[in-house]
């Protein structure tokens, strides 16, 4: 009798370890993706969706089986060792069985048993749906679908999307998500690279030829220096001039000038471009000094993550070009840094 009772306790403890180690594997697809594949008529998706619905009941069955085995183990322990020792032994088993079940050899054996018995369990649940709905554990019925909690997490998922998205699609999505947090100072053409024209300068053939060689279509018109922009000269407007030799930049320019702070976001800049119907903003700092210019084209390129048409296409970073001081400004022969 004693041998039989010891054997029963050992068997129940082994079953407890195996059942508690059951870990049904979900498909890894989100609910949205699973439903999308079902609607497209994929047979595998229909089977997977049906299985995942029944997995909730399998987990509930696992909880019930563990509870029953713990009760049986408690009863046998009390019957063999008496009330005090039996209760203490059962309590000890209840505390440590989870840790033992997580040990790699035990867990692997448990999963091996589960894989062989899953189909039988699914069939049992399918044949007795009302019974298992009644026994369903309330916490198991909650959705396990993951939620995105941050913009950074979404960006990570996009970058890790492998072949689902093309490189161009990834670039478009990443730049679109980062667009509202980027600053105007990141994409502006720096002060040292701005092509300007003096307000009193005559728009003769030589000047127009020089303007054309820059590749730009708009030029800030300055009075004295670049910190005093009084208008914007449009190359297209010069085509309608009757006598280009007798016209100054001040007379041909568009007198409206729009300023934007270097710390404004690109989203703010784009909205301002759309609101003003203007294509060029003068970028200023806290002291209203000119630090650069930004165009509608620059802003759209930052949004889509691709160059449209730019005179600096060969350069990946316009700020590096400016840093090389291509214009050799402030470089006299007797220059000295202090």
Image (spheres, rainbow, N blue to C red):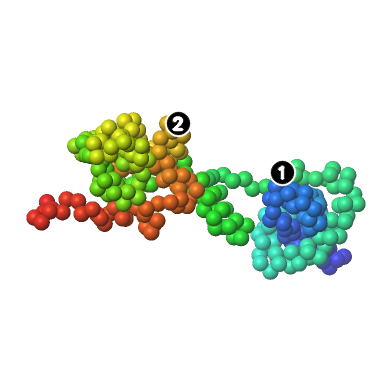
Q: Are marks 2 and 1 in contact (CB under 8 Å)?
A: no
Quarter of the figure with the N terminus = bottom right
Query: Element at badge 1?
Result: loop
> Given the current orientation, which residue lies at the most extreme front position?
242
Q: Is residue 165 or residue 114 the one in the foreground? A: 165
The residue shown at (22%, 39%) is 201
Q: Residues within 10 Å of mark 1 (few under 14, many from 20)?
A: few
Q: Is residue 83 or residue 245 the one in the foreground?
A: 245
State left or right for residue 117 relative to residue 301: right
Q: Position of residue 287 (x, y in %)?
A: 25, 34
Q: Can residue 224 be seen from the camera position used here?
A: yes
Residue drawn at x 84%, y 56% is 122
N-terminal of the pair, mark 2 or mark 1, is: 1
Hey, which residue is sitting farthest left in the picture? 334
What residue sits 31% from the left and 30% below the top?
255
Viewer-nearest residue: 329 or 70: 329
Q: Is residue 12 visible?
A: no
Dot label at residue 275: 2
Q: Residues within 10 Å of mark 2 (few under 14, many from 20)?
A: few
The residue tagged 1 is 142
Q: Position of residue 73 (x, y in %)?
A: 79, 56
- The residue shown at (12%, 53%) is 332
SS class of the residue under badge 2? helix
* Along the line of sight, the residue nearer the viewer: 297 or 106: 297
Total residue callouts: 2
Side (left or right) of 242 relative to 169:
left
Q: Nearer the viewer, mark 2 or mark 1?
A: 2
Where residue 264 sits in the image (x, y, percent)?
38, 37
User: Residue farthest to the right?
Assistant: 127
Query: Alpha carbon of mark 2 to alpha carbon of mark 1: how far?
Result: 47 Å
| Residue 242 placement (x, y as % from top left) | 31, 36
């Amino acid at each position: 009798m004693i041998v039989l009772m010891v054997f029963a306790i050992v068997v129940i403890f082994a079953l407890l370890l195996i059942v508690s180690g059951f870990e049904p594997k979900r498909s890894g697809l989100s609910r949205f993706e699973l439903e999308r594949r079902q609607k497209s008529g994929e047979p595998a998706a229909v089977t997977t969706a049906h299985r995942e619905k029944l997995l909730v009941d399998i987990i509930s069955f696992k909880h019930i089986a563990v509870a029953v085995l713990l009760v049986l183990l408690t009863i046998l322990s009390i019957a063999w060792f008496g009330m005090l020792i039996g209760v203490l032994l059962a309590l000890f088993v209840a505390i440590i069985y989870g840790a033992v079940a997580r040990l790699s050899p035990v867990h692997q054996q448990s999963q091996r048993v589960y894989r062989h018995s899953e189909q039988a369990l699914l069939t049992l649940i399918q044949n007795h749906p009302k019974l298992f709905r009644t026994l369903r554990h309330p916490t198991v019925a909650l959705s396990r679908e993951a939620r995105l909690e941050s913009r950074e997490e979404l960006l990570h998922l996009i970058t890790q999307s492998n072949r689902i998205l093309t490189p161009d699609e990834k670039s478009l999505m990443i730049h679109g998500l980062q667009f509202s947090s980027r600053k105007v100072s990141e994409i502006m053409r720096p002060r040292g690279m701005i092509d300007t024209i003096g307000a009193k300068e005559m728009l003769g053939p030589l000047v127009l030829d020089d303007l054309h060689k820059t590749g730009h279509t708009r030029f800030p018109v300055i009075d004295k220096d670049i910190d005093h922009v009084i208008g914007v000269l449009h190359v297209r407007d010069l085509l309608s001039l009757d006598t280009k030799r007798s016209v100054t930049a001040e007379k041909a320019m568009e007198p409206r000038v729009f300023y934007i702070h270097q710390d404004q976001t690109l989203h703010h800049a784009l909205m301002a471009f759309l609101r003003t119907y203007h294509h060029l903003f003068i970028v200023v700092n806290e002291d209203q000094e000119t630090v650069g210019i930004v165009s509608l084209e620059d802003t759209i390129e930052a949004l889509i993550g691709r160059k449209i048409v730019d005179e600096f296409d060969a350069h990946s970073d316009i700020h590096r070009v400016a840093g090389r001081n291509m214009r050799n400004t402030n470089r006299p022969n007797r220059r000295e840094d202090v």
